[in-house]
Image (cartoon, rainbow, N blue to C red):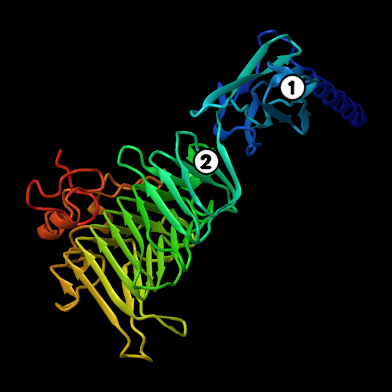
C-alpha cells in the first residue's frame, strides 16, 4: 500500500511539473514591461554610451515564451540590445526566449547615437518588439537625444584662440593653454570634459559669460547614473581648472564650474601681478577643493563657491580679496570632511606669508561646527598673517577681535534660533541633490552688508538684482527678494 501511495504521488508531481512547463499560448497573454519608454537622455553623438537596463515581467502562473524579439529599425538602429545574455545584432532577431512563471528577464541596452550635425540635441528613437508564441505583440520605445559636439583631443594652444557658438566642445585627454597662448571663451559656450581631462592654463584664460548666457565647464557624462539622478550632480567626474605658476591676467566672468575633482587650483606665483579675477560665477559640487590658491594675487566678486569634499576655499599665503561672495559647504557625499574656508601662512615646511586676505560683505557657512579656520605658523611668528572680515556672516564662534572682525555676525549668536541651512531658500533637497543659496527672509545676512562696499564694488547681485535700491544691501552674492 505504501508503495502504491508513493507511486501515485510521483505521478501527480510529474503531472504538475508537466503542467508548469506548458507555455501560455493565449493571444491575450502578454508581459509587463517596466515602462513605455526607456531613455538614455542626452548623449554625445558617435560615442558609445554607458549601458542601461529595464525588466520584462511574467506575472502569469505559467511560463511564457517569445518566439521573436527584434528592433524595428533593424540594421539602421543606433541601439544595441542584450537579452538574458543574448546579443541582438543589427538587423537580426532573437528567438525562443523564455520567462518562467512569476519571473522576469533583464534587458541591457546602449546606443551609439547618430551625428545629425546640429547645435541642439536631436531626438533619436527605435522600438524593441516582443512577440509571444500566442501571437501577442508588445514593444517598448528606446530613446535618446543625440548631441553633436566639436571635439578637442588633447589640444595644446600656443597662440590666441576663441571658443564660441552654441555647439558644445568636447575635451578629451586634456586642454592646455601654453605660456604664449590666450584662450577666450565667449558667452553661452559649454565645455564638456572627459574623466581624464582638466584645463591647464600656463598662458591666459578669458571667459566672457553673461547672466543670460553663462559659460559652463562640466563632465561629458550626460546621462543618468541611476533613475532621476544625472551624472551632472555627481562630483569627481573630471579634473578641473589649473592656473599655472606663470599664468597671469586671467578673467572669468559668469562661468559655472561643477562636477569635477577641483574647481580652480592656483599654483604659486608672483604676488605682485593679479593672477585671477573671478566674477559672477559658480563653483559647485567638487570632490576636493572649490578654489585653492597658493601664494597668489586673486580677487573674487559676486561668486558662489559651494559643496566641496575638502574645502570650498583653501588659501596658502598670498594677496586675496573676496567681495559679496557666498562660500557654503553642505557637501552631501560620503568622504567629505572639509569646511567652507581654511587659510594659513605656511604649507608643510614652506613659509607662505599672508600679505592680505580680506572678506567683505560675504557669507561663510556650512554644515560643520566651525567653517572658518585660520592657522598661523608658530615657528615663524613674525611672518605676515594679515586677514580681515568686514560685514560678514560667519559660521564660527564669536571672536572679540575688532582688529580682524568688523560688524560681523557669528553663528554662535543665532544657533538656538535657526540651523545654518536656514539662511538659504528653498530648503536643500538632499534626495535630488538640489542646493539653492538664495537668501531666506530669516537670514541674519539680510540688510547687514556695508552700503559703501556694495555701491562701489558690486551694486548688482549675481542674479542682476540691485543691492542699493533699498539702501540696505545683503551679505553674500544673492540679494534677498521679497515675494
Considering depth in this image, is 280 or 64 the residue closer to the camera? 280
**Left or right of 425, for residue 286:** right
Judge the density around disc 1: few (<14), some (14-19), many (≥20) Cα neighbours within 10 Å.
Answer: many
Q: Which residue is mark 1?
A: 63
User: Above or below — where is 392 with respect to 225?
Assistant: below
Q: Nearer the viewer, mark 2 or mark 1?
A: 2
Q: CA distance from mark 2 to mark 1?
A: 50 Å
Q: Nearer the viewer, residue 183 or 170?
A: 183
Q: Quadrant of residue 312?
A: bottom left
Asked whether residue 147 is in view, the answer is yes
In which image quadrant can residue 85 be found?
A: top right
Q: Is the residue 301 above or below the residue 226 in the image? A: below
Q: Secondary structure at mark 2?
A: strand
Residue in view at x 47 percent, y 60 percent: 203
Question: Which quadrant, please, contains the C terminus?
Answer: top left
Q: Looking at the rendered structure, which numbered label has been put on residue 169?
A: 2
Where in the figure is residue 375, as x and y percent of width and height?
A: 34, 80
In the figure, 479 relative to 384: above or below?
Answer: above
Q: Secondary structure at mark 1?
A: loop
Amino acid at each position: 500500500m505504501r508503495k502504491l501511495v508513493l507511486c501515485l504521488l510521483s505521478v501527480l508531481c510529474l503531472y504538475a511539473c508537466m503542467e508548469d512547463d506548458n507555455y501560455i499560448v493565449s493571444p491575450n497573454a502578454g508581459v509587463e514591461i517596466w515602462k513605455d519608454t526607456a531613455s538614455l537622455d542626452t548623449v554625445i553623438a558617435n560615442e558609445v554610451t554607458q549601458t542601461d537596463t529595464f525588466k520584462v515581467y511574467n506575472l502569469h502562473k505559467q511560463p511564457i515564451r517569445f518566439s521573436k524579439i527584434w528592433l524595428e529599425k533593424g540594421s539602421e538602429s543606433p541601439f544595441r540590445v542584450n537579452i538574458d545574455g543574448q546579443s541582438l545584432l543589427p538587423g537580426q532577431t532573437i528567438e525562443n526566449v523564455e520567462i518562467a512563471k512569476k519571473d522576469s528577464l533583464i534587458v541591457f541596452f546602449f546606443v551609439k547615437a547618430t551625428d545629425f550635425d546640429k547645435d541642439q540635441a536631436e531626438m533619436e528613437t527605435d522600438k524593441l518588439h516582443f512577440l509571444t508564441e500566442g501571437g501577442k505583440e508588445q514593444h517598448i520605445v528606446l530613446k535618446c537625444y543625440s548631441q553633436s559636439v566639436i571635439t578637442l583631443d588633447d589640444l595644446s594652444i600656443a597662440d590666441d584662440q576663441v571658443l564660441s557658438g552654441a555647439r558644445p566642445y568636447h575635451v578629451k585627454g586634456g586642454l592646455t593653454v601654453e605660456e604664449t597662448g590666450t584662450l577666450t571663451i565667449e558667452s553661452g559656450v559649454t565645455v564638456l570634459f572627459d574623466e581624464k581631462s582638466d584645463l591647464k592654463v600656463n598662458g591666459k584664460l578669458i571667459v566672457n559669460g553673461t547672466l543670460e548666457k553663462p559659460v559652463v565647464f562640466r563632465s561629458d557624462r550626460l546621462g543618468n547614473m541611476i533613475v532621476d539622478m544625472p551624472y551632472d550632480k555627481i562630483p569627481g567626474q573630471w579634473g578641473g581648472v589649473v592656473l599655472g605658476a606663470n599664468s597671469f591676467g586671467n578673467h572669468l566672468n559668469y562661468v559655472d564650474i561643477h562636477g569635477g575633482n577641483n574647481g580652480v587650483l592656483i599654483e604659486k606665483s608672483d604676488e605682485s601681478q593679479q593672477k585671477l579675477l573671478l566674477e559672477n560665477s559658480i563653483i559647485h559640487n567638487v570632490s576636493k577643493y572649490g578654489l585653492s590658491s597658493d601664494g597668489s594675487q586673486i580677487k573674487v566678486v559676486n561668486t558662489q563657491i559651494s559643496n566641496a569634499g575638502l574645502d570650498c576655499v583653501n588659501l596658502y599665503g598670498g594677496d586675496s580679496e573676496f567681495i559679496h561672495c557666498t562660500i557654503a559647504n553642505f557637501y552631501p557625499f560620503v568622504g567629505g570632511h572639509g569646511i567652507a574656508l581654511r587659510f594659513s601662512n605656511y604649507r608643510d615646511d614652506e613659509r607662505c606669508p599672508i600679505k592680505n586676505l580680506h572678506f567683505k560683505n560675504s557669507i561663510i557657512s556650512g554644515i560643520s561646527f566651525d567653517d572658518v579656520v585660520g592657522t598661523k605658523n608658530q615657528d615663524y611668528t613674525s611672518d605676515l598673517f594679515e586677514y580681515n572680515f568686514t560685514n560678514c556672516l560667519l559660521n564660527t564662534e564669536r571672536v572679540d577681535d575688532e582688529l580682524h572682525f568688523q560688524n560681523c555676525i557669528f553663528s554662535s549668536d543665532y544657533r538656538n534660533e535657526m540651523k545654518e541651512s536656514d539662511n538659504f531658500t528653498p530648503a536643500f533637497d538632499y534626495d535630488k541633490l538640489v542646493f539653492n543659496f538664495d537668501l531666506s527672509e530669516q537670514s541674519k545676512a539680510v540688510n547687514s552688508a556695508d552700503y559703501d562696499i556694495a555701491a562701489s564694488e558690486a551694486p548688482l547681485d549675481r542674479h542682476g538684482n540691485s543691492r542699493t535700491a533699498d539702501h540696505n544691501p545683503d551679505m553674500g552674492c544673492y540679494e534677498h527678494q521679497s515675494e
